[in-house]
């Protein structure tokens, strides 16, 4: 039955990248909880090439999941990193990571792995230059304020950020700070992540000819390349799949006759899928989100064309087109993915469990906050209420009866009549 088949595909896709999702969000939690704002400002706060290069290196050593990458980039930007550095980190953590190169090599060969890394550097450089030219320092600070205000319930005070690293590693409070930021990121993005996997699962049911029909494969080379590098990102946007999840579908497209540059453009567009674009709009505002998508799209096309030209000159464009199954056809077996998924499932349970043991629900925004982290509180109706920040406390103090009744109704499972 197609309904079950699509859902099963989505579950298998989620299984392939579950560990990377948890790892990425855990790293995001550590960045938010443990890294002082002043240190990030000094390391990544400048708008120069050195800061962008450092961010690229940090991204390459980070998670390979698109959703986790945008969460970490937002954390870096809010902590004081420059916009160019945050975006460089974001792209590097999805296109320059080690595990992505391995999967590419296994599916379609080392030339694609090399193209991904070379093109990724070109892409980041092009995007950084464009943002430097198009976004002034004053505008960047405005965007930072928008990002900070976009989700006021997601601000977690971290009482452990000033501790030395060796004390953080053994501090329950420090790990509690990480856990609450980890849970906050999941609460903010779980709908987008779930929608992405579900849509990808059902798109995987479409015949290969549907995708191949979108690309020009028998026109003169310049026309074919130009069309492929534009349509490739569009297909990637429709596929709704994270960076590593894109690789098997890229192999299917390559086997169907799409140009080398078209496959590269397809791989680079994992940060332009609709749920992530919606996240840009939610966090950075509609105006800048539109500019960011345009800059990213243009950088993707430019990087793909640059790789095609360079690899053609060096005679490195592959000609062999193997038949590779899509990710939806890969069975769940006992392999390194299964081991990593189990390990990081335990990490997920441990971090969420820590928030359940030490946390309290903010009655205004619904976020779980640490009762021991020095969060703002109010006393009403004989009960202490905990808040993620002054914004939610102020709203509660204005209408305590409204928010307390909503909280009690939610806890009891009965809806409240308040609007």
Image (cartoon, helix red, strand yellow):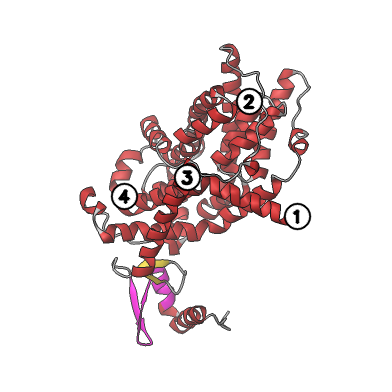
Question: Is residue 375 positioned above or below 240 on the image?
Answer: below
The residue to which callout 4 is attached is 37
Q: Is mark 2 on a helix, strand or loop?
A: helix
Q: In which quarter of the image is the N terminus?
A: bottom right
Question: Is residue 190 positioned above or below 114 on the image?
Answer: below
Q: Position of residue 349 (x, y in %)?
A: 42, 60
Q: Give the range drawn in magenta.
A: 376-396
Marks 3/1: CA–CA distance: 35 Å
Residue at the image position 35 percent from the left and 56 percent from the top: 178
**Marked residue nearer the N-terminal end (2 or 4):** 4
- Give the camera-side residue of 314 and 334: 334
The residue to which callout 3 is attached is 69
- Give the camera-side residue of 293 and 172: 172
- Mark 2 vs mark 4: in front: 2
Report the side of 57 relative to 322 (left or right): left
Q: Quadrant of the C terminus?
A: bottom right
The residue to which callout 1 is attached is 1
- Give the camera-side residue of 103 and 154: 103
Marks 3/2: CA–CA distance: 24 Å
Q: Where is residue 36 in the image (x, y as percent from the top left)?
A: 29, 50
**Marked residue nearer the N-terminal end (2 or 1):** 1
Q: What element carries label 1?
A: loop
């Amino acid at each position: 039955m197609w309904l079950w088949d699509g859902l099963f595909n989505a579950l298998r896709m989620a299984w392939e990248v579950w560990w990377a999702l948890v790892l990425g969000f855990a790293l995001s939690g550590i960045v938010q909880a443990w890294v002082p704002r002043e240190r990030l400002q000094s390391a990544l706060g400048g708008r120069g090439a050195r800061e962008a290069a450092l961010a690229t290196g940090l991204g390459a050593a980070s998670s390979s999941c698109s959703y986790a990458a945008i969460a970490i980039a937002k954390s870096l930007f809010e902590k004081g990193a420059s916009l160019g550095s945050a975006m460089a980190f974001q792209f590097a953590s999805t296109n320059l990571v080690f595990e992505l190169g391995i999967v590419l090599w296994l599916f379609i060969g080392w030339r694609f792995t090399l193209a991904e890394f070379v093109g990724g550097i070109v892409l980041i450089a092009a995007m950084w230059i464009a943002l430097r030219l198009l976004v002034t320092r004053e505008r960047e600070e405005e965007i930072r304020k928008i990002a900070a205000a976009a989700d006021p319930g997601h601000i977690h005070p971290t009482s452990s950020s000033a501790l030395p690293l060796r004390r953080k590693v053994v501090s329950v409070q420090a790990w509690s700070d990480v856990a609450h930021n980890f849970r906050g990121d999941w609460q903010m993005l779980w709908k987008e992540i779930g929608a992405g996997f579900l849509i990808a699962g059902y798109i995987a049911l479409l015949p290969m000819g549907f995708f191949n029909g979108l690309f020009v494969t028998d026109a003169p080379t310049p026309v074919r390349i130009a069309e492929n590098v534009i349509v490739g990102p569009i297909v990637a946007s429709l596929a709704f799949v994270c960076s590593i999840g894109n690789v098997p579908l890229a192999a299917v497209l390559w086997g169907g006759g799409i140009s080398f540059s078209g496959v590269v453009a397809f791989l680079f567009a994992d940060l332009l899928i609709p749920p992530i674009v919606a996240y840009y709009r939610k966090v950075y505002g509609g105006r800048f989100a539109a500019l960011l998508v345009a800059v990213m799209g243009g950088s993707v096309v430019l990087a793909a064309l640059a790789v095609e030209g360079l690899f053609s000159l060096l005679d490195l464009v592959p000609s062999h087109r193997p038949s590779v199954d899509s990710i939806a056809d890969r069975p769940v077996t006992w392999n390194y993915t299964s081991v990593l998924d189990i390990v990081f499932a335990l990490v997920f349970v441990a971090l969420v469990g820590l928030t359940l043991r030490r946390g309290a629900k903010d009655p205004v925004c619904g976020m779980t906050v640490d009762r021991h982290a020095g969060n703002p509180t109010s006393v009403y109706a004989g009960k202490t209420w905990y808040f993620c920040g002054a914004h939610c406390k102020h709203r509660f103090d204005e209408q305590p009866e409204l928010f307390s009744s909503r909280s009690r109704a939610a806890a009891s499972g009965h809806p409240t009549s308040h609007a």
